[in-house]
Amino acid sequence: GDYGGQYRPQVHYSAPQNFMSDPNGIFRDASGTWHLYYQYNPLGLSFGNQHWGHATSKDLYHWASQPIALGPPNRHTTALFSGSTVVDRNNTSGLFPNQDNGVVSVFTLAGRDPDGGFGGPQVQSLAYSHDGGFNFQFYEHNPVINSTSNQFRDPRVMAYKDHWVMVIAYSRDFTIGIYTSPNLLDWTHASNFSLHGLLGAQWECPNLIQMPYIDEECHRQDDVWTLFVNINPGGPLGGAVVQYFPGSFNGTHFKPVDSAARTVDSGKDYYAMQFFNNIGPGTEVEYPVSIAWASNWQYTQLVPTGQEGWRSSMSLPRRHYMTKIKGVGWKLVSQPYNLERVMGDTLAVQKNVTKEVVAVEFSGVKSNAVFWEVNITGIPERALRSLSLNVSFVSPSTTESVRLAYVFGGVDFDLYGGDTPFSLDRGGAKGFDHRFFTHRFSVSSPHDDGTWSASGVLDRSLLEVFIHGGIETVTSTFFTQEPVAVVLFSLSPDLPKGLSVDLRVVGLNSA
Ligand code: FRU
């Protein structure tokens, strides 16, 4: 594919052409190759004719696009929806005699109506691969879980002790079913998890993950099982959102620690988050790693990347653990994974910034993608609202911008009428107009210990922000008419004594 184009991300994965959505069946094989499959319409720039596209990588940034891995047996009657992939190392399925690297993908085969819609039954089927995940054949006795429902999908399978576990969404019943199997072929319903947290209109793409837990004193504690549930439509900002529930899991039942609803990302372009299989505690890659689809169903089929022949990219790969935050309790931490693989030349490093405005021009960076970072220390307990930091990404020719604003005053409801300390505004980008392309996002971001930090990746039409070490993230697409080529840090005058602001901007190398 041609990975040029003003909007085409350079360090985030996008399919060579046409419409891509959810990451599917992502796993790491024993040789260290990461496999990314994804919802893919090879025939057009919007949803439909869903196949599983495929790409592979050694580092999660430099991807080789592979031939389509899986397609529906007959695209007029079915489509291949989301699902997951496992390595059947011990040949529990019997599909892999004399092999310890057999690959099994489990997915929803979605039935189509005569008019092409998706009102038909959603059943769970298998395909298996003898060559490590490149060529697949359908299992002879599909489906492995039958159904007459058109709202039963997105099986996510994992190994648990001596058996396999599947979590799957009964989408309009706001229920996650938990199934078990000794062999990936015969599945038994074990329990349901229903009606917790945010409901929205549908639940989709569940993941159940054993999460490392690092407490506030940075001590590793017992892992905490965490259930991720994707909602669309009906997220708090409209459209798609990912929520999660920390809890416990005994192989058949999941029990949340409390009834709180927690969302993973505070932007609007972060959905269908999926975790890589075949990694985690006890493996070479100890911490869970995820990828999400960096878009939102509300406008994904209309975004102007269509002019460049492609739609949607993935998020950065993220590494995760759970922590606890004073006053808030359990919190998922998300950080870019392996980003050093694409780090290039340092464009600016400034310690103890005193100037009110620091502009870093990066039109010389070939990828037009940068990493940036701000670290603040010595924040007084009651900083004044007038103290603020803005980080703007500006198109010099049109002055369009995307702006992050941080107000040191923080959450002080009496003084500020409930203002939140951190916000993002993509309304200054003029290349796309849609009634649900929300412009402003606000995020609560604590800084109890007098420090605060934010960093992120700006990648042509995608901005991913990691606040305070990743306890909050904001993922946002934006579409300027002309490319962004300046990072502008602006500080309010008269910073309090003891406050120190450090900045860094680094060019990224195209993957
Ligand atoms: C989530 C989703 C899944 C479904 C897939 C179809 O974005 O709606 O529930 O399997 O997309 O492309």
Image (cartoon, rainbow, N blue to C red):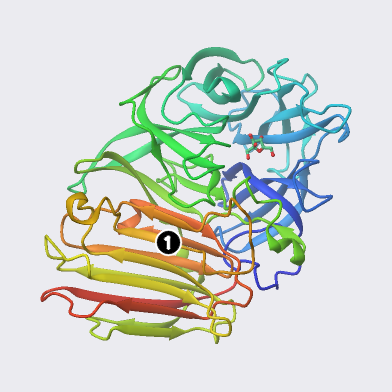
Question: What amino acid is labelled 1 in the image?
Answer: Leu
The quarter of the picture showing ligand 1: top right
On screen, residue 384 above or below 73: below
Q: Residue at x 22, y 80 (%)?
A: 493
Q: Which residue is mark 1?
A: 424
- Corner quadrant of residue 82: top right
- Quick one: quadrant of the C terminus? bottom right
- Corner quadrant of residue 274: top right
Where is residue 109 drawn, in percent x and y? 75, 28
On screen, residue 286 above or below 305: above
Where is residue 103 drawn, in percent x and y? 66, 36
Circle 1 SS class: strand
| 130 sits left or right of 36 in the view | right
Where is residue 131 drawn, in percent x and y? 73, 43
Q: Residue at x 80, y 39 (%)?
A: 71
- Corner quadrant of residue 151: top right
